Image (cartoon, rainbow, N blue to C red):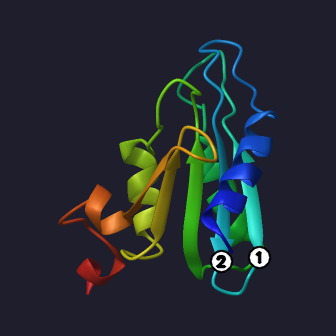
Amino acid sequence: MEDKLLIKIAMEAREKSYSPYSNFKVGAAVYTKSGKIFTGCNIESAAFTPTICAERVALSKSISEGYKDIEKIAVVGSDKKISFPCGVCRQFLREFGRDIKVICAKNIDQYEVHTLEELLPNSFGPEDLD
């Protein structure tokens, strides 16, 4: 799947965001190695701590459907600058691989591509529990 198409799908997911407190909409689209796509948007809570990021929503949908073979994820937030996953989302993604491709976008034409290892170097993962 082309990165730009995955960004477009993440932008569509962003429109479903429930963000009445921050007014900062985020969309994400996970692409699995088996070709499945799962989307997510950020969902805020008045109590703040139950708030969940778009990346974790999309990844949770993927995992709950039995797809742990994550190839890449596109993340789109503000249209003013490129958005990156927060630290919690980076660590959540790390559970499923260091080599996940993370597409951080402002729009279809302005984006950066990183590996999760680049965004979360020297990370702790499942293999560290052996």
Camera sees residue 60? no
- Amino acid beneath label 2: Thr
- Amino acid beneath label 1: Lys
Q: Quadrant of residue 63?
A: bottom right
Residue position marked by numbered label 1 in the rendering: 36
Residue 129 position, x and y percent, is 27, 79
Camera sees residue 32? yes
Residue toward you, 96 or 13? 13
Residue toward you, 98 or 66? 98
Residue 82 position, x and y percent, is 47, 37
Q: Residue at x 78, y 73 (%)?
A: 65
Q: Is residue 55 above or below residue 98?
A: above
Quadrant housing the C terminus: bottom left
Q: Residue at x 66, y 53 (%)?
A: 7
Quadrant housing the N terminus: bottom right
Residue 107 position, x and y percent, is 61, 40
Residue position marked by numbered label 2 in the rendering: 32
Q: Residue at x 63, y 35 (%)?
A: 26
Number of marks present in the image shown: 2
**Are the residues flagged by discs 2 and 1 in contact, CB closer than 8 Å?**
yes
Q: Marks 2 and 1, Cα distance to the nearest angstrom? A: 5 Å
Q: Residue furthest top?
A: 21
SS at mark 2? strand
Residue 95 is tagged as none
Q: Is residue 90 above or below residue 33?
A: above
SS at mark 1? loop
